[in-house]
Image (spheres, rainbow, N blue to C red):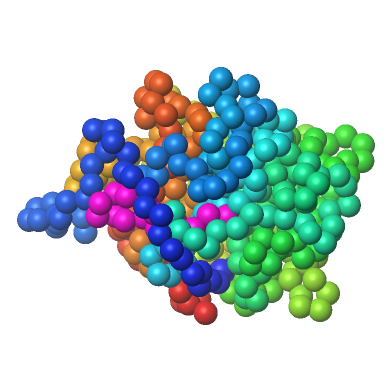
Amino acid sequence: MQIARRSLTVTSAACVLALATSPAFAARPTPTGADADSTRSAYHLSGWAVLPAETFVPGSEESGAFTGNPAAPFPGQPVQGFSAVHAVGDGSYLVMSDNGFGARTNSQDFQLRVHHIRPDLVSGEVELLDGGFVLSDPDAHVGWSLWRADRVLTGWDFDIESMQIATDGTFWFGDEFGPYLLHTDAQGRLLEAPIPTPGVQAPQNAQLVGEPNLLGSKGFEGMAIAPNGQHLYPMLEGATAEDKAAGLAADLRIYDVRLHPATGAAFTGEFVRYRMESAAHALGDAIAINAHQLLIIERDSKQGAEASFKRVYLVDLRDRDRDGYVDKQLLVDLMDVPNPELLGTGTDPFTFPYFTIEDVEILDADTIAVLNDNNYPAAGGRGPGVQDVNEFLTIDLAEPLAVDHRLLPGMP
């Protein structure tokens, strides 16, 4: 099994967004003396920036009319809900918003969108750039009714949670409502019908036959792509009913999908198993670092003072101990990140106690980026009543990863 990703160049123009004004956040100082030496002995927080919660796509349509929130409708489409990230290679990132406000029934006016951002790890500011796009189905590949007559896709239609870019520059998205795989061009236009998962159906599946065997919001939360561009590896966030009945409630499936230029995408029928530390945990993200290793975020479903388990694991698909599961070892405990430069919250260690942490990316062999999904307009990650923002972290690792050079940002 081989896994990788490809970078994409995007033209950009800046629209500067202000740094959050909370005194709990601090910009990045330059380490000196003992502090500089200490950053070499273990993984540590090396960069931080924040996108304020009240950030909306300029000139976009109102949203939130179905949420029941007294502040709705919101003045535009919020730049939030980041559930996938892709480093472009010029210091900017593509970030994908999920279905919107948390459920199908309140996200009808939330447009599925990929944004283009540039974090500044010195000032702590984030720019919203041109180059983003909205998902749509102008050629009517979806065989059932969509919410909008113009066939712009919304959170009523799909719940996209993962994203990869193929070697031909097209995009693949992992959905939770089917769960489906969605294939689009670089402007977000569907190129083919949604691809269902054989033998797996969630309650929101538009083609549901019989009883669903996967809980809602437990579809393809993570997804990787092979170095040669010939395979996708979408990963479920929850266990199937069959796995639960077999006593495997903590097991998540990583599927193998073959990408062929002539015949298209097809599930091979094969999958490997990842075992969570608890059946109550959830998948945050899954990406590849080489032909057989992944980075996987495993998390609890708590926030603020109640949060305790938010981790990044290094996973080996080869199952070297032959126990029937991919091998895993702790890479970063996001609730205990050494912070010698006192970035972000200004505390050492730095903690990342958000309900959903759903983005990890490789910047180089020694550095990863991690982002949260702030679930706008949610609050509580940084304290009772404190509105959740989108935080962008870089973490320098204690030892370099064996990264396939084709996975590095900006590589063809």
Q: Quadrant of residue 335?
A: top left
Residue situated furthest front in the rendering: 59
What residue is rendered at 53% in x and 36% in y? Answer: 75
In magenta stretch: residue 117: yes
Q: Position of residue 286 (x, y in %)?
A: 56, 54
User: Is residue 61 visible to the viewer in this orientation of the structure?
Assistant: yes
Choose between 95 and 264: the one closer to the eye. Answer: 95
Is residue 311 shown above or below 398?
above
Name the side, left or right, on which 317 lies relative to 179.
left
Name the side, left or right, on which 169 lies relative to 261.
left
What residue is rendered at 84% in x and 58% in y? Answer: 141
Choose between 293 and 89: the one closer to the eye. Answer: 89
* Total marks in image: 0
Is residue 61 shown above or below 120?
above
Q: Position of residue 199 (x, y in %)?
A: 84, 48
Q: Quadrant of the N terminus?
A: bottom right
In magenta stretch: residue 68: no
Q: Magenta residues, as a range?
A: 114-127
Q: Position of residue 192 (x, y in %)?
A: 81, 63
Residue situated furthest left in the rendering: 33
What residue is rendered at 66% in x and 69% in y? Answer: 170
User: Is residue 358 visible to the viewer in this orientation of the structure?
Assistant: no
Name the side, left or right, on which 185 lies relative to 84.
right
Q: Quadrant of residue 245?
A: top right
Name the side, left or right, on which 85 lies relative to 218.
left
What residue is rendered at 69% in x and 74% in y? Answer: 230
